[in-house]
Amino acid sequence: MAERGGDLIGARRLFGEARNLAPPGFESAWLIHNHLGNVLNALGDRKAALTHYHRCRDQLDGKTPPRKAAVVLGNIGVVYALDGDLEQALAWFELAAMQYERTTPVAGTATNLGNIGKLYCLLDDPDRGIPMLATAIRMMGEMGYLDGQMQEYTKLGECMEHLGNTEGAIEAYRQALTLAHPLELRRGEMLARAALARLLDDPVEAAEHERIRAHLSEELGQKVSAPT
């Protein structure tokens, strides 16, 4: 699919055409809006993405499977989080959690819980946030989603940094790297290596993490720097 293959401009055009061709009352129109929101968010047009996510939400009803409703609500939370409106983001993630509670746990359940935990930490309530992140890490492991577990460890590292716990952050990022798989698109690994390059006192090890991060960034075409 173009959306996953990197042709985001083409994906936006195709989903836009599908939306225009959909007849009135088309029951899967919400899905088109959700995909359009995903593409626009990836292109950096968060305002337009939010418009489509809200249109998608407006078309959900009691017949919509809880897991799909949760994805839509969580997507809205992601946009607010990217815009820095953490309280709004938290509210939407918690709405998504209510939907996830109505179905069998999946990777999205753990991701959403980790998002909530991270936001509580960023809002300086680690007593609520850290246990949620720990649960998300455990859930990902139990379900066998090692890439997801890596991402949750990376969230934990970011929270530890925010809370001023450098040792805890380094340990979380190291745990993330033990889960990195050589055949996957490892944005999570790049984030962890960038953080370690920034935090470690050992200049040799820090330089090695930065070297690998730069190589991955070039190889995957994703720019993740190690800020000073």
Image: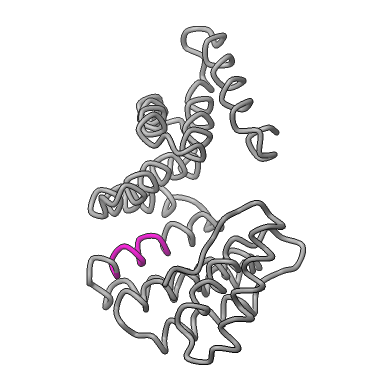
Residue 22 position (above or below residue 43):
above
Q: Nearer the viewer, residue 88 or 113?
A: 88
Q: Nearer the viewer, residue 39 or 75?
A: 39
Q: Nearer the viewer, residue 77 or 128?
A: 77
Q: Quadrant of the N terminus?
A: top right
Residue 39 position (above or below residue 164):
above
Horizontal side, residue 192 vs residue 49: left or right: right
Q: Residue at x 55, y 11 (%)?
A: 22
Image spot of residue 64 (x, y percent): 46, 33
The magenta segment: 114-121
Q: Nearer the viewer, residue 7 or 121?
A: 7
Q: Residue at x 43, y 57 (%)?
A: 112
Horizontal side, residue 58 vs residue 148: left or right: left
Image spot of residue 93 (x, y percent): 35, 52
Predominant secondary structure in magenta?
helix
Q: Quadrant of the C terminus?
A: bottom left
Image spot of residue 2 (x, y percent): 68, 32
Residue found farthest to the right: 183
Total labels: the figure holds 0
Residue 122 position (above or below residue 56):
below
Magenta segment includes 88: no
Q: Residue at x 50, y 20 (%)?
A: 29
